[in-house]
Image: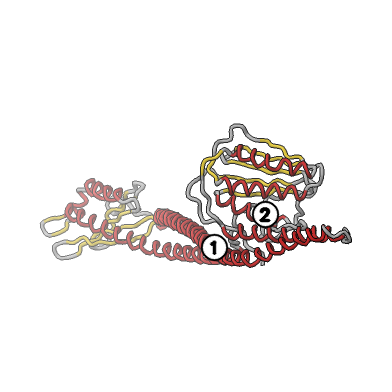
Amino acid sequence: MTIPSARPREVPAGSLGGEILRAFLVFALLFVALTATAEHLASRELDTRAMVRRLDLGQDEAERIADAVAALAWGRHGIDFDRLRQRREELVQVVDERLWARSFVQYVEVRDRWGTPLLFLTREGEETGSSFGSLPSGEGMEALDAVQVARAPLLGAAGPEGDVRLGVSGEQFQREIAGLQRSLRVQVLLAAFFGLAVLGVGFLYVLHLIRRIRRLEEAKIQADRRATMGFLARGLAHEIRNPLNAMNMNLQMLEEELSGLPQAGTDWRDMLHDTKREVKRLGDLVTSFLDFARGNPVQLEKRDLNAELREVARLFQAEFAKHGLELTLDLEPSLPPWEIDDKQFRQAVINLLLNARQVLRSGGRVVLRSRVGSGGEIVLEVEDDGPGIPPEALPRIFEPFFTTKGGGTGLGLPIAQQIVERHQGRLEVESAVGNGTIFRIRLSRKVGRVPLPTSPQVAS
């Protein structure tokens, strides 16, 4: 079951939206590629900078330790290594403090002017040297997983008289680099996600602006079309109504003349009746077209909608009974007052009732219903148990001059649609072949300044 709305058709975003979506996807892919490239280059740069920083820090620590060792071993003629051996505990304490001050330092080695190791201290607490024991073997050094990164001289009175060598843990260094890389990667991903989110919001906003501009352009085109139609309608109404009035008067005079002739047959009565009926149909068509083209603004006043519907039903009871049809009311007692233009709103309901009467056969039934919707809106329905609307005709029923009924003008539903839209409402239809039709008017709770009315696009 289809429920098309009689609101102005939204501008299809098919081609335009597709192009924008493709542009968005291309830009997003380029953005992701750029982000990945930036992350890779930044990671490589991070490795280099981290290494340089560790070398600088290691060199600084080696110089600090060298100054401290030189101060401990300073004698009358420069650095006295015998004195340094005597102050072994102080030396270990100085080196140990500096060793633990930097988490990346793995070992510190002190050598004399002849290159003889005096002290070898690791983070695990191993302490060796020529005076304190033997240095670690080659396998022991490999087990430390350490790399010498700094070397500072022990400066005596005559120049360098030894040196301090400092090594860092390769494993620890790699762990720190990996941690920095993970942190950098998370930051880059967060920045990329934020960038994509901003891009997505911008895409949606641009799409909204484009659709809004399209709707405004469509509204302007429709306003221009209405102005042109109004101008043409006024001219046509003047040019057509006068001849129609003259034709109608002549037909009445001809009918009176023929009625006084005894030799006249009876066929002329049927011909005159058919001619007068067609003249009247043309007059109704001109009037409807003029009403449709004018687009009169609404004058809103608070009204009792149930009272309006009862009045319309009272006017139509006799006509419906004449055609063997039943018109019943199903009104919500607690329906609140609503701001409407009573004349135009009655015309909309009348057009819907006329549409139902024209499709029903004798014995048919029409229900005029009112209720409050789930969102607080007013809902009015005209329901019939007629043949329903064919699916192929359903999308076109609000197009001007489209009709499936012989003798119809094709303007009743478009005029009803215009009036409902002027009241900031929406006209819907629900129909299925063989199951009748429901025309539903929804009046929004937002009542205020009524925007420029819009009409359906005229079929080309």
Quadrant of the frame with the C terminus: bottom right
Residue extending furthest toward the left: 76
Residue 328 visible? The answer is yes
Residue type for callout 2: Gly
**Is 29 left or right of 361, judged from the image as shown?**
left
Which picture quadrant has residue 190? Answer: bottom left
Label 2, residues with CA under 10 Å away: few <14, some 14-19, many ≥20: many
Residue that badge 2 annotates: 412
Residue that badge 1 annotates: 223
Which tag is nearer the camera, tag 1 or tag 2? Answer: 2
How many marks can you see?
2
Q: Is residue 392 above or below residue 304?
A: below
- Residue drawn at 57 percent across, 45 percent down: 342
Secondary structure of residue under mark 2:
helix
Image coordinates of residue 424 in percent, x first then y, are 55, 49
Residue type for callout 1: Ala
**Is 317 left or right of 117, judged from the image as shown?**
right
Image coordinates of residue 165 in percent, x first then y, are 29, 59
What colouring method underlies this structural image? secondary structure
Image coordinates of residue 185 in percent, x first then y, are 45, 57
Label 1, residues with CA under 10 Å away: few <14, some 14-19, many ≥20: some
Residue extending furthest toward the top: 333
Which is nearer the N-term, disc 1 or disc 2?
1
Secondary structure of residue under mark 1:
helix
Residue 139 visible? The answer is no
Between residues 344 and 262, which one lies in front from this camera angle? 262
Which picture quadrant has residue 296? Answer: bottom right
Kindly report the distance in space between the C-alpha atoms of the residues bearing marks 1 and 2.
20 Å
